Amino acid sequence: MPSVLITNQFIAARTGSELHALTLARLFERAGWDVTCFTLLYGYPLQGEFEAAGIRVITLGSEELLANHYDVLFAQHRLAAEHVWNIGRISFGKVIVSVLGYLADAEQPPSFWQEADGFVFVSEETRDHVRAEYSLEGVPEMVFPNYAPAEYFDVTRKLPPSPQTVCALSNHPPQELRELVAHARDRNVQIDLFGYETTSVEVTPGLIAGYEAVISIGRTAQPCLAAGVPFYCYDQFGGPGYITPDNLSRHAYNNFSGRSEQTKRDAAALFSDLIAGYPEAASCAQRLRDIARDAYDLDALFGRLLAFID
């Protein structure tokens, strides 16, 4: 049984990187790997999901529990990865550096990046920034974008002419998004705001299917596209609004972060755009599902990742 050690700075909250670590751990286990995760901070609510999945997590201060050898080090987050790397007794068959962004220092490649057998990037934007800063010539690389698990493609949702219930998911909601909730309520539209700073919820097919549109960025995009629920791309950087087949590639390049079109709107303008653009967004929902099936199916992407590691 091959073994993999996945590092992540924290495993505690429902943030993108922490949920990505959980998803990868589950997939490696399902593929017959012996999986261990290492983190600097372990806590709830995400700890409960790792425990329920039976995934081994070792924390800072318990390094003696780490094995002496792993077939693969999946090095995600610089500090956690470097800490493990500097434990001299541990050897690795292959080193894969996973880069989930380029803005935060924690996302930078670790100091041992030149020892890597391959790089995995969350987006083309991140790949291009890292390429420009580091000499990766000759190092194998792949883009492993955010994804949609198979169950999201099974969601059936009849869309109305105009949205009455909207889900806003943000771990860093800008003030205008907070104000949008009350602005919409006064106009008989319900907007539920969830996230790290408000109410943390697990994003599931049932949650997405319970709404007629979703406002968010990043890893929420692909599940919404797969479920056929209109996705309005907006958060701390602003954003372009609804994702359509015509603009998808441009905004996917930036991982649906909003950085591709940093248009800021006040609450009133956000609401007007959310309502006015909805008919077109709803009309192309099936086309977006087909695109998502080809580009973002999780099982297919993980199969590519295993082939890349091999």
Image (spheres, rainbow, N blue to C red):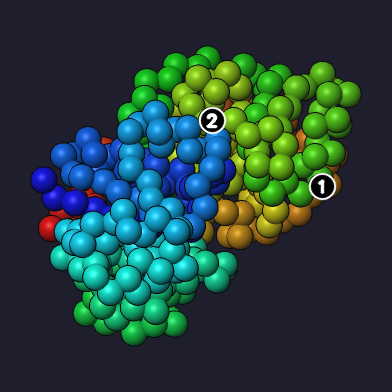
- The residue at 43%/20% (across/down) is 155
Q: Is residue 74 left or right of residue 15?
A: left
Tell me if 297 is positioned left or right of 258 in this view: left
Q: Secondary structure at mark 1?
A: helix
Which residue is the site of mark 2? Answer: 202
Residue at the image point whose x is 54% and y is 43% from the top: 43
166 relative to 123, above or below: above
Which one is nearer the viewer's eye here, 55 or 220? 55
Is residue 132 in sight in this rendering?
Answer: yes
Circle number at residue 198: none
The amino acid type found where label 1 is placed reads: Gln
Up-down relation of residue 194 to residue 296 (above or below): above
Q: Nearer the viewer, mark 1 or mark 2?
A: 2
Of labels 1 and 2, earlier in sequence is: 1
As helix, strand or loop, the secondary structure at mark 2 comes to loop
Residue ID for mark 1: 175
Going by the numbered disc 2, the residue's amino acid type is Glu
